[in-house]
Image (tube, rainbow, N blue to C red):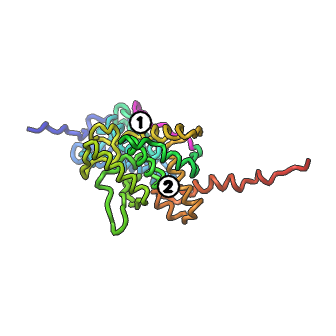
């Protein structure tokens, strides 16, 4: 027998009227016993404090994303007092898992926190449960150092292929360098995501915002994949459709994806083995792939944006402008006579 659902409606007797409470909003409080108040009504009152239509639109978008997330989990919110700190924390973790940047996550979370702060000021809630939940740290942008061609070849050749871990490490680097994947995209690849279409071997990549893109595997990546699968089979590990491609422990099949920090350590390990002392990360591999297409192959920037999974072409242009700003710097033209 299931547990009785808690009644989350709010009676007007629970709310105290204050002079600064809008008359229209207070009327909604009085009617709360008789009808279900939609959360959109409170959002409408909240955004009314902002003059800019653009600001209002931004808040509505971020707030409705939050409530849509709660609804997908079975909670239909009709009043701010239904929102708990745990809801906020789970939403934050979901955004992190989906690969949103810390800046985007903070913007979305600040919108929800501001709404709850307003709700507290309007006496809709007794305290703000979101104050104790930490926001992700916003990373300040710094240029990502890419690898040159010699370094890429050296790193790919570095793993010990007499071990299954060596085959896994080589495949990780091939996928990062050849497909320009994000860490979060790499570790989420499942066996079922790799398929053949005509003469092409293709992998489906789940990118930011759950947007899929389909990238062909070049012959080198195909060979690395085959060698990895053969090595795993030799150790008695047989893959099934829903298994993650990249297995972290290699002691048995993993039910969870490899941790992103492990991918970081793999790249750092082989960079150091090859005598590369500059600061590198998995994103260095992504930057290498994108820069290689823009620089060496002269691939149209729109095609590169699709390849990289950039929703805005301006993001791809950053990789171009970082190089151009140095190559064409006016500093090279400043000369003084001796």
What residue would you read off at disc 2?
A: 54
Q: Judge whether residue 228 is colored magenta.
A: no
Separation (CA) of disc 1 from disc 2: 24 Å
| Residue 321, position as x, y percentages in the image | 62, 55
Q: Is residue 32 left or right of residue 315?
A: left
Residue under the image location 24 percent in, 46 percent down: 74
Main SS type for the magenta part? Answer: loop
Q: Which residues are magenta?
A: 131-141
Residue under the image location 38 percent in, 61 percent down: 214
- Give the residue furthest to the left: 1
- Give the residue furthest to the front: 162
What residue would you read off at disc 1?
A: 121
Do the numbered discs 1 and 2 sit on residues whose CB atoms are within 8 Å? Answer: no
Q: Nearer the viewer, mark 1 or mark 2?
A: 2
Q: Is residue 131 left or right of residue 323?
A: left
- For marks 1 and 2 on the same chain, the one whose residue lies earlier in the sequence: 2
Residue 323 visible from this viewpoint: yes
Q: Is residue 139 above or below residue 335?
A: above
Residue under the image location 34 percent in, 31 percent down: 126
Residue 87 or residue 274, whichever sits in front? 274
Q: Is residue 178 above or below residue 101?
A: below
């Amino acid at each position: 027998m299931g547990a009785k659902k808690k009644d989350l409606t709010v009676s007007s007797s629970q709310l105290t009227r204050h002079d600064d409470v809008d008359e229209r909003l207070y009327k909604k409080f009085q009617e709360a016993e008789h009808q279900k108040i939609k959360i959109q009504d409170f959002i409408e009152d909240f955004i009314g404090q902002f003059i800019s239509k653009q600001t209002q639109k931004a808040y509505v978008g971020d707030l409705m994303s939050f409530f849509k997330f709660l609804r997908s989990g079975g909670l239909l919110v009709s009043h701010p007092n239904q929102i708990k700190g745990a809801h906020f924390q789970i939403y934050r973790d979901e955004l992190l898992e989906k690969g949103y940047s810390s800046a985007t996550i903070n913007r979305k979370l600040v919108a929800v926190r501001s709404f709850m702060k307003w709700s507290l000021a309007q006496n809709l809630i007794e305290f703000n449960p979101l104050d104790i939940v930490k926001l992700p740290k916003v990373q300040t942008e710094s240029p990502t150092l890419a690898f040159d061609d010699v370094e890429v070849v050296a790193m790919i050749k570095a793993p010990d292929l007499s071990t299954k871990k060596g085959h896994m490490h080589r495949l990780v680097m091939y996928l990062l360098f050849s497909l320009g994947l994000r860490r979060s995209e790499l570790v989420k690849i499942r066996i079922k995501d790799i398929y053949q279409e005509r003469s092409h071997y293709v992998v489906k990549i789940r990118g930011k915002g759950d947007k899929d893109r389909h990238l062909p595997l070049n012959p080198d990546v195909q060979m690395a994949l085959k060698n990895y699968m053969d090595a795993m089979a030799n150790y008695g590990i047989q893959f099934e459709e829903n298994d993650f491609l990249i297995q972290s422990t290699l002691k048995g099949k993993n039910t969870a994806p490899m941790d992103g920090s492990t991918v970081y350590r793999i790249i750092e390990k082989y960079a150091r083995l090859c005598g590369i002392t500059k600061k590198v990360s998995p994103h260095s591999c992504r930057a290498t792939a994108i820069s290689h297409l823009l620089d060496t192959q002269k691939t149209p920037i729109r095609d590169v944006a699709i390849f990289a999974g950039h929703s805005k072409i301006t993001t791809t242009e950053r990789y171009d402008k970082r190089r151009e700003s140095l190559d064409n710097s006016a500093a090279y033209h400043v000369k003084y006579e001796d």
